[in-house]
Amino acid sequence: MYLDAAKKQEIFSNYGKSNTDTGSAESQIALFSYRIAHLTEHLKLNRKDYSTERALTMLVGKRRALLNYLKDRDIERYRAIVKKLGLRK
């Protein structure tokens, strides 16, 4: 499996306040980014997999909504997570 418990713990410890901080916007954005990267690689190999394409589109929308939320609440945290993840905006 591409995303096991150990990988989730690593993501949450790197981007959240602690490795048990699963609900913060930063940790959720990082988790979505990891899943988006995985699905993008899958779609490069399987370009007719439309259900995965839809799931990817929905994930990108969820991540965008969280980024917008974070931008409205705390612009410094938004800038930090965008820079750390290497996102365009």
Image (cartoon, grey):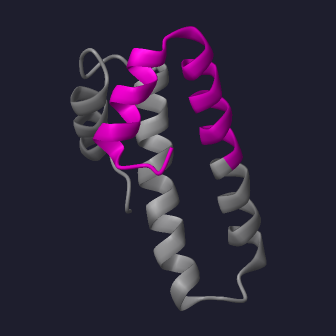
Figure check: 79 above or below 20: below
**Picture residue at 30% right of the left edge, 18% below the top:** 20
Residue 49 visible, this orientation: yes
Dominant secondary structure (helix, strand or loop) of the stretch shown in magenta: helix
Q: 27 or 85: nearer the eye?
A: 85
Give the x, y percent position of residue 67: 57, 31
Query: Residues in magenta?
Result: 61-89
Which quadrant is the N terminus positioned in? bottom left
**Picture residue at 34% right of the left edge, 49% below the top:** 4
Give the x, y percent position of residue 36: 52, 58
**Picture residue at 27% right of the left edge, 46% below the top:** 7
28 magenta-colored:
no
Q: 46 or 57: nearer the eye?
A: 57
**Picture residue at 60% right of the left edge, 40% below the top:** 63
Give the x, y percent position of residue 55: 70, 59
71 magenta-colored:
yes
Q: 23 or 78: nearer the eye?
A: 78
Figure check: 80 above or below 20: below
